[in-house]
Image (cartoon, rainbow, N blue to C red):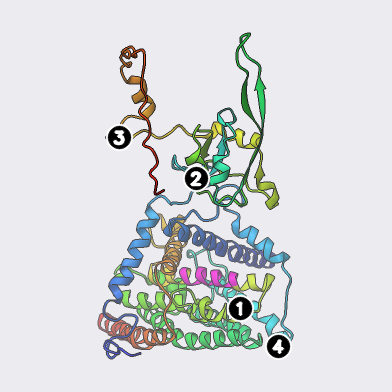
Amino acid sequence: MSSNQNAPGAPAPKGRGAIPGLIKGLATTARTLARPSHTAEYPDAPPHLPPRTRGVIALLEENCTSCMLCARECPDWCIYIDSHKETIPAPTPGGRERQRNVLDRFAIDFSLCMYCGICIEVCPFDALHWSPEFEYAELDIRDLLHEKERLGQWMPTVPPPPALDPGAPEPAEVAAANKPPRAARPARPATTVRPQPPAPQGDA
Amino acid sequence: MSDALELVLRTLSVLAAFLVLPLLVGQTEHKVMAHMQGRLGPMYAGGFHGWAQLVADGVKFVQKEDITPRDADRPVFKLAPAVALVPYLVALAVIPLSPTVVAADVDASVLFVLAASAVGILGTLMAGWSSANKYALLGGMRAAAQLLSYELPIVLATASVALAAGTVSLPGIVHAWHPVWLLWQAPGAFCFLLAAVAELQRPPFDMPVADSEIVFGPYTEYTGLRFAFFLLSEYAGIVVMSLLFAVLFLGGWHGPFADTLGWVWTLLKAAVVAVVVIWFRVAWPRLREDQLQRLAWLVLVPVAIAQLALTGVLVVVTS
């Protein structure tokens, strides 16, 4: 022992400062005994998860346009998308035929996913959502590749978005809906002269 | 014929108490320790709050392979758990729960209990020596040193009570007990309790089995049922020491309705002592080996001797 100050005279375990510490230990344990315990009885009682829990990624298939933004932004490329184009016949005679993307396959490999949420952030059509569901462990790592049917089953578990903060501006959709209708444009003049772009300079 | 029947009945009831009370203490430790740490403890075995956890543990231990190390001293190694366990059974037989509820009423029961419970440590020593394992040997040496240091305060504190009562019979001591003794014999009771915890090798005096230093001390090489016997002997030791403390210092069966409910009072007082022993384990860290010896020789032995002197003076003055 380098610091031997309180060794002579006072016995080490009962020396200065030991008794209050011992009593404090007894008091702390007794107080904890009197309080309810912290244990969450998980399999018997459902856990209380915060609303923004990142449990699993759910897919709302109707909203997906197969734009591939999520698959391209994914840092570890764990999203697989197959789609084909389908031609919709013109609804009225003489009308124009339309083309739309049809989603054939949407799969997320949760053995690769790192739950960064970038795919959910970039989705322009709110097709991907965080769900707090977390009980999808598998015995084989290959079974963690979940197809769009399974991803869609998690959709009902997605909680409603949390309420806005008191001082937050109103959401863009609400603001747009509440805006007074635009005043009618004044009629265009018969001839318009478009401004020409400046001619390229000779030194280019 | 009836004498033989009574003998069998008494023996069986002691055996039943010996098998049930340590399990009760163990389950209490599970639950009390868990709640003191903000946990729930066992919740599944048996259905209601895990009441059968220790029964399940026992079934598990029975299923395990009984291994004896190749270099071990086989007879000693195999005998050690019995030597650790049986003395507490013998000691339990002479502790009176009430004037009538006592399995074997011997005259010098104080000496008998002290002698019997001291033999229990011999099992730890045998286990440590015969295991052919350096950790077990270290643990055995620590147990020996601890036994030598802490047997003295126990004997001195008990001698003080026996001196005050003027008898070495446990029922006699309880008969002579008076509530003033709670104050008069308090230093001795303090010494006895600490020394009893040390003798049982319970935290904060569990240097012989310090798991972070020497694996599990003398019990390192044990498996299965033999290991379970060592654990059982620890809890049986708590039962014996708690009952002894209740009888010596807390007045045993004294209390309301002592004529009919005397044995309940003794058991209740012993239960409180057992919970305190468990509480020490949860609240306090383990002592270092030198601190352990300092506490014994510089605090407990002097206090116990002073208590003995005080008792002697008062007995002489008042008689």
Quarter placement of the N terminus of chain B = bottom right
- Reading the image, the residue beneath label 1 is B219
Horizontal side of B86 relative to A3 (left or right) equals right
Which chain does the numbered disc 1 sit on? B
User: In the rendered view, would you say B217 is above or below B273?
Assistant: below
Mark 3 crowd level (few <14, some 14–19, many ≥20, 10 Å Cα):
few
Q: Amino acid at mark 4?
A: Asp
- Reading the image, the residue beneath label 2 is A118
- Is A134 within the magenta? no
Q: What are the residue bounds of the magenta stretch? A: B231-242
User: In the rendered view, would you say B265 is above or below B180?
Assistant: above
Please tell me whether mark 2 sits on a helix, a strand or a loop. helix
Cα separation, mark 1 vs mark 2, equals 55 Å
Q: Position of residue A137 (x, y in %)?
A: 63, 48
- Reading the image, the residue beneath label 3 is A168
Labels 4 and 3 within one chain: no
Q: Amino acid at mark 2?
A: Ile
Horizontal side of B185 relative to A146 (left or right) equals left
Mark 4 crowd level (few <14, some 14–19, many ≥20, 10 Å Cα):
some
